[in-house]
Image (cartoon, grey):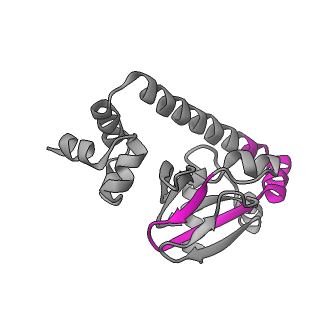
């Protein structure tokens, strides 16, 4: 169990350095959960009670349209954070489903504990601000790539940013994430 928290500590200390006492406070705010492949962390319409740090495994976030077609919103693997940000912070309902593509281990942080950490440790407030900024930048880049880039360019950008992720994602899901058909994706691979 301690090794799992070391992954979180290493992740945090890429941004801020914590004393042992400070990290003990951080650890006390998280709960650890394990999920099976294909298990949903939350579904569209659910209340979202946690922000998740991925210790191991792979997640996909997807929206289901009126024709029951899945549209991939996001992926998250080890050392990444994931949640429905709007639902988590506002108490609203999830706008997408978060599902495990592999057996997954998560550290879960409630909004109450998130606020407690930020109020007690300015370092953690700074850490989460930096993570939030990085998330906004990533979202902006994704939106702009759909507005200004073709499928091939979006694929190349994804390879450049997340090469390890591509080895673990089924082609059908990758095509959905890129906004193309599986056939178009196959042509990009050739």
Q: Position of residue 117 (x, y in %)?
A: 80, 53
Q: Residue furthest left?
A: 190
Q: Residues in magenta? A: 96-125
Residue drawn where x is 64% and y is 48% of the image: 17
Instruction: In the rendered view, tell whether residue 32 sits above or below residue 93.
Output: below
Q: Which of the 4 image quadrants contains residue 19?
A: bottom right
- Does residue 152 appear in the picture of this structure? yes
Instruction: In the rendered view, tell whether residue 128 sits above or below residue 52.
Output: above
* Residue 142 located left or right of residue 111: left
Q: How many marks?
A: 0
Q: Position of residue 168 (x, y in %)?
A: 34, 60
* Residue 156 located left or right of residue 187: right
Work out which quarter of the rendered image holds the N terminus and state it: bottom right
Front position in the image: 3 or 129: 129
Q: Position of residue 9 (x, y in %)?
A: 60, 59
* Residue 50 located left or right of residue 165: right
Q: Indicate whether residue 110 is drawn in magenta.
A: yes
Front position in the image: 121 or 42: 42
- Does residue 80 appear in the picture of this structure? no
Q: Residue furthest top?
A: 148
Work out which quarter of the rendered image holds the C terminus and state it: top left
Q: Indicate whether residue 128 is drawn in magenta.
A: no
Q: Position of residue 85 (x, y in %)?
A: 69, 47
Residue drawn where x is 82% and y is 52% of the image: 91
Residue drawn where x is 78% and y is 47% of the image: 89
* Residue 166 located left or right of residue 102: left
Residue drawn where x is 18% and y is 42% of the image: 187
């Amino acid at each position: 169990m301690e090794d799992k928290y070391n992954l979180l500590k290493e992740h945090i200390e890429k941004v801020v350095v914590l004393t042992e006492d400070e990290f003990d406070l951080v650890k006390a705010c998280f709960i650890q959960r394990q999920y099976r492949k294909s298990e949903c962390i939350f579904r569209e319409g659910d209340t979202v009670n946690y922000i998740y740090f991925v210790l191991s495994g792979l997640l996909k976030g997807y929206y289901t349209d009126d024709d029951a077609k899945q549209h991939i919103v996001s992926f998250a693997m080890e050392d990444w954070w994931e949640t429905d940000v709007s639902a988590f912070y506002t108490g609203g309902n999830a706008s997408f489903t978060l599902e495990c593509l592999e057996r997954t281990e998560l550290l879960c942080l409630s909004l109450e504990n998130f606020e407690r950490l930020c109020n007690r440790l300015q370092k953690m407030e700074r850490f989460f601000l930096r993570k939030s900024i990085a998330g906004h930048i990533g979202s902006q880049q994704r939106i702009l790539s759909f507005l200004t880039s073709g499928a091939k360019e979006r694929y190349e950008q994804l390879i450049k940013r997340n090469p390890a992720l591509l080895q673990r994602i089924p082609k059908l899901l990758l095509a959905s994430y890129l906004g193309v058909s599986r056939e178009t994706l196959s042509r990009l691979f050739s």
